[in-house]
């Protein structure tokens, strides 16, 4: 997919996020929107996945460790063809398979149930180790939040990944610098994130703008050349990216837009789409 198509797809993914959260009257738009370009690049360019065969044993795996940003993952999966885009507004509704956090038993394309912060990276390490033991060529991608990496289990998993030289594992930190209680640097400062992962024997790639497709492309291409070390891509992003009133606003971490706000958000995204 060329860059223009990727950019158009990212707007579609953002529309799906806003539509899903509005339909649910609950959810987490801010971090879903900051990671929308990452979801888009992974599912439409980077990862070896097939919507017609979501359980292919040779597929690449993805673990959404920051599981509350499920609207972003669901929108990417739907737009990629794993299930109908029309189902996105049923997010969190009674009887809907689109739960508030990813569920691998009921949602096509979801490789790991997640949501308890800090746990996803451990699961990703297990998948990556299994790939090594089974002599498979698949890669494992794990998206973590910068607030989430305050959890100790993240660093236990990182130590394991470095010790086992899991070079088929790529961790992405969505570094939008905001968590539910405010700036991550003020709540419980994780910086410097890159130096911490380096200390656990990771090859670290810093991305100055994690909402820029060219920079993401460069980072993921570099990641695939690394041998004998897991990779961590630290991507600086903008919380709420693409929706004017949500951008860099901590209040939009975990609440849904009302009807008027929804209309404004969709108008913002339609203008982005028209500009492409």
Image: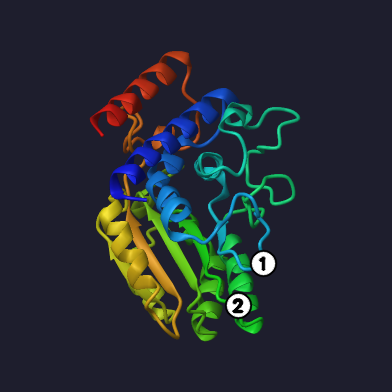
> Label 1 vs label 2: CA separation?
9 Å
Residue 272 found in image quarter: top left
Q: What element carries label 1?
A: loop
Of residue 20 and residue 248, the one placed in the foreground of this image is 20
Q: Looking at the image, do the residues carrying marks 1 and 2 touch, with CB atoms under 8 Å apart?
A: yes
Q: Is residue 7 above or below residue 189?
A: above
121 to the left or right of 215: right
Q: Residue furthest top?
A: 260
Q: Is mark 2 on a helix, strand or loop?
A: loop
| Residue found 43% across the figure and 60% down from its top | 46
Residue at which label 1 appears: 57
Chain-order first, disc 1 or disc 2: 1
| Residue found 65% across the figure and 32% down from its top | 92
Q: Position of residue 116 (x, y in %)?
A: 62, 53
Of residue 183 and residue 193, the one placed in the foreground of this image is 193
Residue at which label 2 appears: 136
| Residue found 40% across the figure and 73% down from its top | 224
152 to the left or right of 237: right
Residue 58 found in image quarter: bottom right
* Crowd class of label 2 (few under 14; some 14 to 19; many from 20; radius 10 Å): some
**In the drawing, what numbered circle is on residue 143?**
none
Q: Position of residue 276 (x, y in %)?
A: 26, 34
* Crowd class of label 1 (few under 14; some 14 to 19; many from 20; radius 10 Å): few
Of residue 193 and residue 29, the one placed in the foreground of this image is 29
Asked whether residue 78 is in view, the answer is yes
Asked whether residue 188 is in view, the answer is no
| Residue found 36% across the figure and 19% down from its top | 264
Q: Where is residue 162 in the image (x, y as percent from the top left)?
A: 49, 81
Q: Where is residue 168 in the image (x, y as percent from the top left)?
A: 50, 75
């Amino acid at each position: 997919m060329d860059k223009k198509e990727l950019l158009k797809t990212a707007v579609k993914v953002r529309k799906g996020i806003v539509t899903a959260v509005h339909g649910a009257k609950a959810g987490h738009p801010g971090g879903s929107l900051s990671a929308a370009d990452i979801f888009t690049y992974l599912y439409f360019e980077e990862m070896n996945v097939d919507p017609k065969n979501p359980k292919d044993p040779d597929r690449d795996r993805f673990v959404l460790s920051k599981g509350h940003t499920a609207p972003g993952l669901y929108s990417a999966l739907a737009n990629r063809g794993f299930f109908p885009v029309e189902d996105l507004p049923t997010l969190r509704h009674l009887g809907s398979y689109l739960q508030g956090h990813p569920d691998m038993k009921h949602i096509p394309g979801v490789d790991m149930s997640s949501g308890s912060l800090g746990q996803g990276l451990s699961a990703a390490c297990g998948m990556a180790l299994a790939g090594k033991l089974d002599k498979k060529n698949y890669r494992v991608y794990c998206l973590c939040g910068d607030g989430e990496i305050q959890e100790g289990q993240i660093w236990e998993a990182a130590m394991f990944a470095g010790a086992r030289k899991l070079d088929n594992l790529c961790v992405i930190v969505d570094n939008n610098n905001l968590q539910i209680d405010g700036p991550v640097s003020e709540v419980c400062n994780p910086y410097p994130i890159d130096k911490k992962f380096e200390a656990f024997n990771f090859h670290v790639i810093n991305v100055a703008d994690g909402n820029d497709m060219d920079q993401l492309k460069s980072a993921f291409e570099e990641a695939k050349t690394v041998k004998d070390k897991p990779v961590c891509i630290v991507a600086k992003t903008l919380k709420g990216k693409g929706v004017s009133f949500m951008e860099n606003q901590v209040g939009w971490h975990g609440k849904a837009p009302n009807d008027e706000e929804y209309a404004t958000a969709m108008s913002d995204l339609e203008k982005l789409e028209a500009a492409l």
